[in-house]
Amino acid sequence: MWLKDSSIGRKFVMALSGAALVFFLLFHGCMNLALVFSEEAYNAICRFLGANWYAVIGSLGIAFLVLVHFCYGLYLTVMNRAARGNDRYAVTDKKKGVTWESENMLVLGFVILGFICLHLYNLWYKMQFAELTGIETGVFDPQNGAAYVKALFTEPIWGQVYCVLYLLWFVVLWLHLNHGVGSAMTSMGLNNLKWQKRVEVISTVVATLVVLPFTVVALYYLGMGIAML
Amino acid sequence: MAKKEDILNAAKKAAEVIKEKVEQVAEREEVKEAVEAVAAAAKKTGKAAVAAAEELIAPKAEAPKAEAKPAAKKETKIITPADAKIPAGPLELKWTNYKNHQKLVNPANKRRLDVIVIGTGLAGASAAASLAEMGFNVLNFCIQDSPRRAHSIAAQGGINAAKNYQNDGDSVYRLFYDTIKGGDYRAREANVYRLAEVSNNIIDQCVAQGVPFAREYGGLLDNRSFGGAQVSRTFYAKGQTGQQLLLGAYSALSRQIGKGKVKMYTRYEMLDIVLIADENGEKRARGIIARNLVTGRIERFFAHAVVVGSGGYGNTFFLSTNAMASNGSAAMQMYRHGAYFANPCYAQIHPTCIPKHGDFQSKLTLMSESLRNDGRIWVPKKLEDAKRLQAGEIKGRDIPEEDRDYYLERRYPAFGNLVPRDVASRAAKERCDKGYGVNNTGLAVFLDFSEAIQRLGKDVVAQKYGNLFQMYEKIVDENPYENPMMIFPAIHYTMGGIWVDYELQTSVKGLFCIGEANFSDHGANRLGASALMQGLADGYFVLPYTIQNYLSDQIGVPRMSTDLPEFAEAEKAVQDKINKLMAIQGKRSVDSIHKELGLVMWDFVGMGRTAEGLKEGIKKIDAIKKEFWTNVYIPGEANSLNNELEKALRLADFIEIGRLMAVDALHREESCGGHFREEYQTPEGEALRQDDKFSYVGCWKYTGEDSEPELIKEPLDYEFTERKTRNYKN
Amino acid sequence: MDQYIDIKVRVWRQAGPKAQGHFETYELKHVFQGASFLEMIDILNEQLVAEHKDPVTYDHDCREGICGMCSMYVNGHPHGPDSAITTCQLHMRKFKDGETITVEPWRSRAFPVIKDLMVDRGAYDKIMQAGGFVSVNTGGVPDANAIPIPKPVADEAMDAASCIGCGACAAACKNGSAMLFVAAKVSQLALLPQGKIEAAARAKAMVAKMDELGFGNCTNTGACAAECPKSVSLANIARLNREFLAAKFKD
């Protein structure tokens, strides 16, 4: 299977799964933004995405994408380290035009993955998971997502720590996407001489667009939490 | 004329008398008698014969017991058009006729024939690929790590072809004529015409391979003009034409390697050619001995024919525009086996190289000749200005216009800065010899773009020459937009090489020579953008045909074992030579001796040669040879990767080539093209050909390690062109 | 203005492909800054030969930046700390008096060290043999002007074709990937009508060979293009991806 056996096939899988996750994040971010305007609206979306079959399939799909993206990333890194040979360079120097994040995508990926676990435990476990399994995992109704979010982020001290941690996470995410989006475009062949600079800009813009709504929401709750102190 | 013939006859008579006498005598007195007899005969015939007779007798007087060899030596052998296998008929039909009547090898038999190709430059790679496409089994060797690195890759300017795409009146005949004239009437007409004929096929072939030649906005191929022609016939790919053409040939070669039709041996160096006698006792090239440069192992390879495309021998001078590994050893191996070395003294000196900047310098970098289109060449008018430049007190831009001597424009009003390479080079040397050199070594002249920048604007100049300016700045660390560039001539190309007939076969059966390694098409001087043309013509369109005329007789010859005694002997000789070198364990590094040889070559066998200087040079080369064979130091082991040993083996041959160049230059008492004898110049300092005496190819035949080579002549009769004196003044 | 400098050169010495390598530091006095980097190594080797030591083995040939033979990793950069040049075009004026210069061979599994700074780049040739050509035999081709090619296309093909096959791209890549090298050839030939016919097969064959030879997977860091002595563009990699994906989806 060329998607596994050829290097460009593997790149393509990384690019495609990554791009799909970017779209998911964009949606997730927009959904979160609702929290700032109306908790009602947010809860409406939560209800909509609860235990419905399409939501479940969607969630499974996303989980699968993350798994594929992660496994391929790991596999690629192992292969690539082997391709460098046994002896490493004694001196390495920064190369002009090569970003730090592009050479550290796996590290960034791990950080992101770690936070995904935390995030799933913090919120998803209490919302969609509780609704699906019927197990009581939290104090609120699983469909009252807004209440969980508010509780998590406005709790004195811990809420603010979470806010800052999440903000840091968004920085990591931004770095990952800043290289990832452009890289995915190149891997899918969507680049040429004229578009080279533009793809870089698109990458930064998309990364910022993805991270912005999340950041707004985090800042919103950080502010709220501090005000409540 | 009658007088001349008389002298010649008398001299011949004298020689006969000497021969008789010397054969009779065994005693010293009697030899003296012979001398007297000759002197008596010579009285009648004038000075020339006396000189000839004395030369003949002199060695005899010292060694009276020897055979009458010297007398026989003077009878110069002549190579006739028949020997050179030049087809009969009108010029434009020769090649067609040849192809129509030559023998071919059928496909089934091609599979049974092996051909060794040495070198992967334009000639070697294109020949190997074409032969393999036809069905022959090819063994291809190169000394670099990949066939793509051969030095053809460094050619910048372009490749000529008689396409007449520009509608400026170009034709096959015109390209032929320009090449003959540019070569100062020292090339073989039939070969040059064939070259011009196939030039068009080359462009078609390269385009089909995906060579990205420069194009005009309409999508058709662009041309530029080059020195020595009145038409624009040069095709180019940026400033990297050689690279692109070589990569085209390399891709064709790669395709055949992938198919298994070519077996590629990289990092292998041929150290000898193996000749095996056929049933009639005629020796034929049947294989090679090569050294695996990585393991140091000596290996044997058999083939039905051997083709050598190993490039030129410019590195004899140590400093040249050639690559570091370019060498003349393959040529010397052929020469030692009886292939004639033709016109070794014809070496081209390129005027626009970056000057030497120190003793540690390893090579000279060429800048494209195209710079002379807009750059103006000058030195100061006043000697004191030159002195201050040499001391580094002032820069070129500090010298006012009226104190500048644009010597090319002054001497050659019609062509100005665009005179041919040899003329421009000599003029620069002349100024520097007089003390007008402009850098710390006094060996440089200015190439100034200030006027062009004023006229065209900096942007236009940058667009045209930007990459060259950048290269100059990287090397010299000076901004050529602000201060004139400095240039000096350097050895660039060798027109001389192994003698080949019309079929590109050397005087050894089954041994072929192509590209710069042979002597064939450029006469005494090569025009710009013609080297690429010749390499590819030989490799793609000439050799693959002509070699079949030879191989068709070889289909009955089975593949031979490399265990044959001829292979064993050749390998042993190579091994002995290596052991001898390794055993010297002297004090000098290979490079230090090579540099010494280079200086001697430059001073005595360089741009301006004199009989006296050449004799002196030969003496010095002999001394260097002695020094090398007694005092060189080679570290490491013979049977492992050993760069110093590789260099030493090559230097051993460079020393021989250097000597051969000097001997040839000394014998050629005229100035033509790349060979300038100071005794033979017009009052204005221009080259003076001696067509009545030297209109021939000077072929040298090897006679032994320590004996002088034998001269064989191939007269050059110009049936289809009229000889003219090159004139670039008006 | 160029000066004379004293330097230390820390060179990777490795007796053979299987031998254990190590760094050796040599002192060089009075080196003229106008000398090229390889001329400095020549001076070092003359010094070593004079001391009856084994000189440093390294690849070099044309010394004008076009043959692609020289291949040194100098102070953390393939071809040294100057842009758009090969090692032979690097000059000592890029270094300061008293500096220690570290010189290493290309390090990549597909480029095994032969000795000291000399590596085996035969893998690049093998990739070319797999498909880096237009399948035409000598003779029997149409006239050179039979197919017009727009100038911008021809120019772009030329830029891709300027690759010298030195291996700096794979050496610079943290993934040991040869993508830029492969992409340059695939691009050049895919752009031109002569090469277009086989473009799909070529892309597949060359990529398959590249993978087979143990090169790594490209992650678009751009280090290859940044260090390429001929400034071959990263855009070529996108074109290779495009050609390859199109070919695969067509199958």
Image (tube, coloured by chain):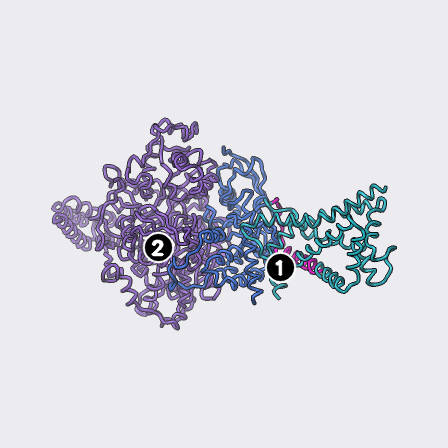
Image disc number at residue B534: 2
Chain B: what color?
A: purple
Which is more toward the observer, B85 or C82?
A: C82
* Residue B263 screen position, x and y as percent: 46, 63
In this rendering, does residue B350 appear at all?
yes
Chain A: what color?
A: cyan
Task: Inspect the image, locate mark 1, and give the three-letter code of the amino acid beneath it.
Answer: Phe
* Residue A221 screen position, x and y as percent: 80, 46
* Residue A107 screen position, x and y as percent: 70, 51
Disc 1: which residue: A12
In this rendering, does residue B702 appear at all?
no
Image disc number at residue B353: none
Task: State which region is magenta.
Answer: A67-94
Chain letter for the blue colouring in the rendering: C
Label 2 to label 1, Cα distance in Å?
Answer: 47 Å
* Residue B477 screen position, x and y as percent: 48, 36
